[in-house]
Image (cartoon, rainbow, N blue to C red):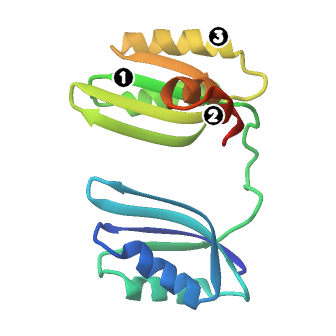
Amino acid sequence: MKQAIISVLLPDRVGILRDVTRVVFDQGGNIVVIRQTIVHGFFSLVFTVVFERPADPAALSAALTGALDADAAVTVRPFAKTPPTPLPAGPTYVVTTHGPDRPGTVYGISQFLVDRGINIIDWMVEGEQDDVVYIAEVVLPPEADFRQVQIDFRAEMARRGLRASICHQNIFRATSEIGAIHNLLSGN
């Protein structure tokens, strides 16, 4: 295996990222893309690695598990550059939904998106019981009628007692971040 995608999940403590990256470095790997977060006290990490020479997935998994706490969940999979199934290619939008926390809300939002062939590429939920914010970065298929999706999404979420919007990622950034609009749009 010359490339791998690896996930690590365990109760958070200081030094986990250091411990994981040390094992990868010792195994001759270079981390290419990484996503790490803490969810309700659990450290969650997903990353891709390229190795100088072929690596054994079982040996890498054992090395990572040995460097971490006993209750760590580690998954190592060979990584292919091309996803196995074609995903929609199109502009990136940000979906935001606000309202009270109720069972089935995440399912309702994701079902709406799936029904329209919209791929979720990032998702976050934060807040308190009475005011939860759901934010998703999504890719609309090129044939999607953005205006109609936006109208339908607002209406569907209103039926669930939620305020909702969909906007292009640049509009979201320009209205949510502090800075010169030129810099926000150019990524500087």
Q: Residues within 10 Å of mark 1 (few under 14, many from 20)?
A: many
- x, y percentage for residue 50? 69, 76
Q: Residue at x 43, y 40 (%)?
A: 124
Q: Nearer the viewer, mark 1 or mark 3?
A: 1
Residue 39's disc is none
- x, y percentage for residue 67? 39, 86
Marks 1,3: beta carbons within 8 A: no
Q: Residue at x 46, y 83 (%)?
A: 64
Q: Which residue is mark 3?
A: 148
Q: In the rendered image, which quarter contains the N terminus? A: bottom right
Compute the Cα span from label 1 to label 3: 20 Å
Compute the Cα span from label 1 to label 2: 24 Å
Q: Amino acid at mark 1?
A: His
Label 1 sits on a secondary structure element that is strand
Label 3 sits on a secondary structure element that is helix
Residue 98's disc is 1
Q: Amino acid at mark 2?
A: Leu
| Left or right position of 101 against 119 | left
Q: Residues within 10 Å of mark 2 (few under 14, many from 20)?
A: some
Q: In the rendered image, which quarter contains the C terminus? A: top right
Which residue sits furthest left?
Answer: 129
Question: Quarter-wise, where is residue 94 in the image?
Answer: top right
| Left or right position of 177 against 143 | left
Q: Residue at x 55, y 21 (%)?
A: 166
Q: Which residue is mark 2?
A: 184
Q: Earlier in the sequence, mark 1 or mark 2?
A: 1
Q: Earlier in the sequence, mark 2 or mark 3?
A: 3
Q: Residue at x 35, y 76 (%)?
A: 15
**Most foreground residue, 72 or 40:** 40
Which residue sits furthest front?
Answer: 180
